[in-house]
Image (cartoon, rainbow, N blue to C red):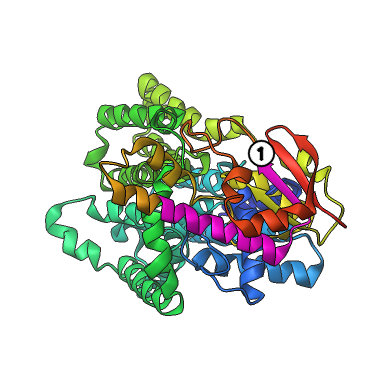
Amino acid sequence: MAAPRGEKWPVAALLAVVVCALLFYPAQRLNHDSSWFLVATRKFFGGEQLYVDILETNPPLAFFLTEPALYLADLTGLSEASAFALTVILAAWLSGLSTIALLRRASITPGERAALLMAGLAILFLLPLGEFGQREHLFLIFAMPYVLAAGLGRERLGLSPGAEIAIGLWAFLGVGLKPYFVLVPLAMTLAGPPRRLPHRIIALPNFALGLALLAYAGLSYLAFPVYFERLLPLLLEVYAGIGDDAATVWRRPEIVGLGLAALLCRRERAWQDGASLRFLAAALGGAAVYLVQFKGWNYQILPMSGLMVLATLWLVAERRLFARRAGLSLGLAAAVLVATLGTQIALGPYRSLTADHFARFSHGPGESVLVLSTNLSAAFPFVNEVRATWASRYPLQWQIPGPVRALRDTDCVAAPRACARSRAILDDARAAIVADIARYRPDLVFIDERTKKSYFAGARFDYLAFLSRDARFARDWRAYRKVGAVPGYSVWQRAGT
């Protein structure tokens, strides 16, 4: 049954959660990826060439979604990080309102409506406690109305064509952030009787989403051909080496939760209900997003976790587990929620291992800074917090670990071409770093001195020895002196700063 028109508590609940978010998130430290996008977007809209002067690994949509935060910061005087948090909260609020509107129309029970609203609010505002504003969080924000509409089905909603198109276009803003995100709507579309698959493919939300993605891909190629012709092939060669080991990828509470969710679905025969099947498919699509990337990074598991929360709470309400006193099923559902939502709550707000250490050496806003590391979190949000200028085209040295490992593991006598290619990539990386040092003349340089640097898989690597093979670096580096050290990093300062 549709919700009574006068029902006010969902809007009140959303408003209360939004107020809490406004009080909490702008005061927290912003995660490293979102911090980098603030810096890179400022450079991009300041005239630097994307994928030439800014060697970001992701498609361009994230830059355009970040730009409103910079405009708000310039307009109000807020810090860029606080302004970004406000724009994310605004987007989450809009998705929350859309969620309420969809649930009011849906022919579902009050218990099912409450369960989906609780899941939506948790996914939008609580699940990303330490990853607020990450692209995976943005994906969940923009995809939420689509997931609900596709999960509940047209027969339960009766939406107008305009509303269905709007849901597909809103979802595009999330799905377009990473190509992997398309696995979620793809999984939901495939879930169901095969004979109805053509109808599901051409459903208006899917049609609008697909058309927007095709237009985006075409426009991206026209605007940024260098990304597809030069950067993307290089990424396919070397970026797989950036990430945690396979054991770390699999050793996640959420993976255990996925197995428990499968047991719950089997016990409750979830496949017999179309909505349960589609919500479960969404969660499996989220799992595919995480596993295809295979990095093991916490924020990449958010789509899987969030959609598991949604599918689990729906199943609890749809199967009336409390009314039936289904103890074992309720225990499985609770375990899934602990493994997903509970894991992120336990991790807490975002923490930086370097920002406070590095800040001791900063001399004030406007100072140019370079961090030589394969960890983006080494430089960001430190650079944002001290309002420094980033002195590199790279956010991190992602181009180095892969070829270093390849040279260590390859018999260059038997495979001379492979070794020559690895050396060429390293030569290009060295030339780019040296050119950036000459161009930006960074006031402070932090160099990763750890014996076991991230993503080198035990291979030894020394940044200064690597760069010193270029005579230009040896000349420019004479202007620098070591002024200190922090855990894992040496600190260098240019003379006269």
Can you give x and y, in whole percent of width and height, for residue 356 in the image?
78, 40
Residue closer to the observer: 485 or 376:
485
- The residue under the point 27% across, 27% down is 267
Local crowd size for mark 1, using a 10 Å CA cut-off: few (<14), some (14–19), many (≥20): some
Compare residues 392 and 270 and report the one nearer the observer.
Answer: 392
Circle 1 residue: 349
Task: Say whether residue 47 is left or right of residue 300.
Answer: right
As for residue 162 lying within the magenta part, the answer is: no
Q: Is residue 433 above or below residue 23?
A: below
Quadrant in which residue 494 is drawn: bottom right
Give the quadrant of residue 434.
bottom right
Looking at the picture, tell me which residue is in the foreground, 399 or 324.
Answer: 399
Q: x, y (%) of residue 301?
A: 46, 41
Residue 20 visible from this viewpoint: yes
Q: Which residues are magenta?
A: 423-447
Q: Residue at x 67, y 33 (%)?
A: 488
Give the dominant element type of the magenta stretch: helix, strand or loop: helix
Q: Is residue 427 magenta?
A: yes
Left or right: residue 491 versus residue 153 is right
